[in-house]
């Protein structure tokens, strides 16, 4: 994303959120974490590519509207389809979603080696609300002591 490959952080994103206030500077560039305010509309535009092979990108925690699909030159802002996975490539893709589900949500390519090579990002929605409302289970606390 933005010519930066995702590298999983040593400390999980959620652990950082639960530990205290966070902003974009809390995260290394390679974590590709976008800190998003609550209840906003986010639009992401993926540029056209030279090939027609699709990258199936999947967003956890949200469904999004597909405003423009990779196989079309037209946009649909009237009644766009809702998905949690979309093909990206070809003539470009545009998606839109609301930041109404606080938490860190992984957004990644579903082709395993693409994700492993860094085709991923984290959409961190409303971290302040996440910190006050997320209650990790004991199993999670045992795995990731705070």
Image (cartoon, grey):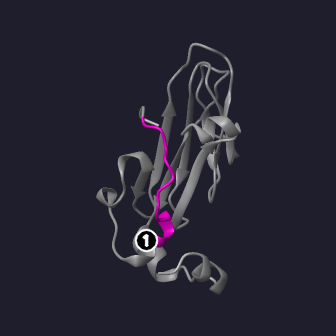
For disc 1, the marked residue is 17
Graded by Cα atoms within 10 Å as few (under 14), some (14 to 19) or many (20 or more), the crowding at tag 1 reads many
Q: Give 104 or 63, whichever is nearer the viewer.
A: 104
User: Can you give x and y, in whole percent of width and height, for residue 95 in the image?
Assistant: 56, 40
Q: Is residue 64 above or below residue 134?
A: above
Q: State the image coordinates of residue 135 (x, y, percent, origin top left).
A: 56, 83
Q: How many marks?
A: 1
Boundaries of the magenta span: 4-16
Question: Which residue occupies 58% across, 48% down?
Answer: 107
Q: Residue at x 58, y 82 (%)?
A: 141
Task: Give yes or no for residue 91 being in the magenta stretch.
Answer: no
Against 140, residue 84 (above or below) is above
Residue shown at 49% from the left, 39% from the top: 44
In the rendered image, the residue lying farthest to the bottom is 138
Q: Nearer the viewer, residue 98 or 11?
A: 11
The local secondary structure at tag 1 comes to: helix
Measuring from the top left, give residue 16's x and y in whole percent: 42, 69
Q: Is 5 placed above or below 19 here?
A: above
Question: In this rendering, is residue 93 above or below 73?
Answer: below
Residue 73 appears in which quarter of the rendering?
top right
Residue 32 visible in the displayed image: no
Residue 61 seen in render: yes
Q: Position of residue 128 (x, y in %)?
A: 40, 74
Could you tell me what secondary structure mostly forms the magenta stretch?
A: loop
């Amino acid at each position: 994303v933005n010519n930066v490959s995702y590298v999983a952080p040593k400390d999980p994103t959620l652990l950082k959120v639960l530990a205290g206030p966070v902003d974009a500077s809390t995260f290394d560039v390679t974590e590709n974490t976008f800190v998003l305010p609550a209840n906003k509309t986010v639009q992401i535009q993926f540029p056209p590519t030279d090939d027609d092979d699709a990258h199936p990108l999947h967003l956890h925690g949200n469904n999004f509207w597909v405003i423009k699909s990779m196989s079309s030159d037209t946009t649909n802002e009237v009644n766009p389809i809702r998905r949690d996975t979309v093909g990206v490539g070809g003539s470009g893709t545009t998606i839109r979603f609301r930041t109404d589900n606080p938490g860190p949500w992984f957004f990644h390519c579903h082709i395993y080696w693409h994700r492993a090579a860094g085709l991923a990002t984290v959409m961190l929605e409303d971290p302040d609300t996440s910190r006050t409302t997320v209650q990790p289970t004991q199993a999670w606390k045992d795995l990731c002591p705070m």
